[in-house]
Structures are given as C-alpha cells and as structure tokens.
Amino acid sequence: MHELALASGMLDIARDELARHNCTRLTMLRVKVGAISGVVSDALLFGFENLIAGTEHEGARLEIEPVPLRLACGSCGTEFDGASIAKELTPCPGCGEVFGHKVLQGKELQVVWIEGE
C-alpha cells in the first residue's frame, strides 16, 4: 500500500509548513489526486487517518480533490476528457485517433492547502 508512504510524505510537507508559520497542529490538508495518478483515494484517507491517530494532529481532515483526465490529441490537437476504462486510449472526438494523446491533467498528486493552529 504505497498510499501510506504518500500520506506520510504529505504529513511531512504539512509539518514543515506549519513550523514555518509557528503552528503546532494540523487541522486540514487538501490534496489534488489525478484520475491516472495511481493513487486510491480511500487508501490515502485510511493511511492519513492512521498516521495522525494519537498525535497532536488527530482529528485533522484530509480533503481529496479529484482531478479528471484531460487529453490533447497528438494528431489534430483537439482537447478532450478521457472517459473510457482504458482512459489513455480514449478515441479523439475530433479525428478518432486512439494513440499519441498528450496528458494535460490527471497525473497529479499535489498538496494544495494546509490549515493549522
């Protein structure tokens, strides 16, 4: 379960940022998770909650903002949402091409907001 390691890294980022602002307790952490990031949001939340249990951060919220897959066709340049099961193999609505798309968004795993006291 690599989500536990990811949650630990996010907590490290939050702790560093809290210390820079003379805060000692995390109250909320918001992250963006892309559709093809390989991160299972429920597992990330589970790992986060287990890591903060019994610490000064217990009770902090983890808000997960999903980022949908957005592609640009490598042939005609049309931008579109990836919606199939094999998301990166979604046919272009402009020309029908299946291969060579550029991922514009959807790979993200990013800490975007930290709240503390």
Image (cartoon, grey):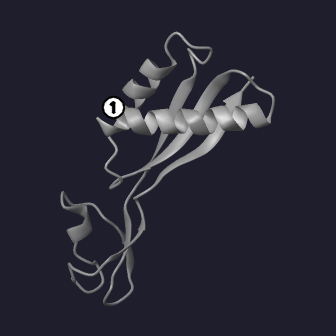
Looking at the picture, tell me which residue is in the foreground, 85 or 58: 58
Task: Name, please, the residue furthest toward the bottom.
Answer: 76
Q: Which amino acid type is marked by label 1?
A: Ala
Q: Which of 9 and 77 lies nearest the eye of the viewer?
A: 9
Q: In which quarter of the image is residue 36?
A: bottom left
**Residue at 26 percent of width and 87 percent of height:** 95
Q: Residue furthest top?
A: 54
**Up/down of 76 relative to 47, above or below:** below
Q: Which residue is disc 1 drawn over?
A: 43
Question: Residue at left 27%, top 78%?
Answer: 92
Disc 1, SS? helix
Q: Residue at x 33, y 85 (%)?
A: 74
Residue 3 figure quarter: top left
Q: Where is residue 10 in the image (x, y as percent from the top left)?
A: 53, 38
Residue 38 on image: x %, y %: 31, 49
| Quarter that holds the C terminus | top right
Residue drawn at 62 percent across, 14 percent down: 56
- Left or right, 88 with reference to 16: left
Q: Determine which quarter of the picture holds residue 43.
A: top left
Vertical relation: 48 (above or below) 79:
above
> Where does the image place residue 101, in percent across and percent down from the top left?
31, 78
- Image position of 56 with respect to 108: above or below: above
Name the residue nearer the viewer: 22 or 84: 22
**Residue 89 x %, y %:** 21, 70
Q: Number of labelled discs?
A: 1
104 sits to left or right of 110: left
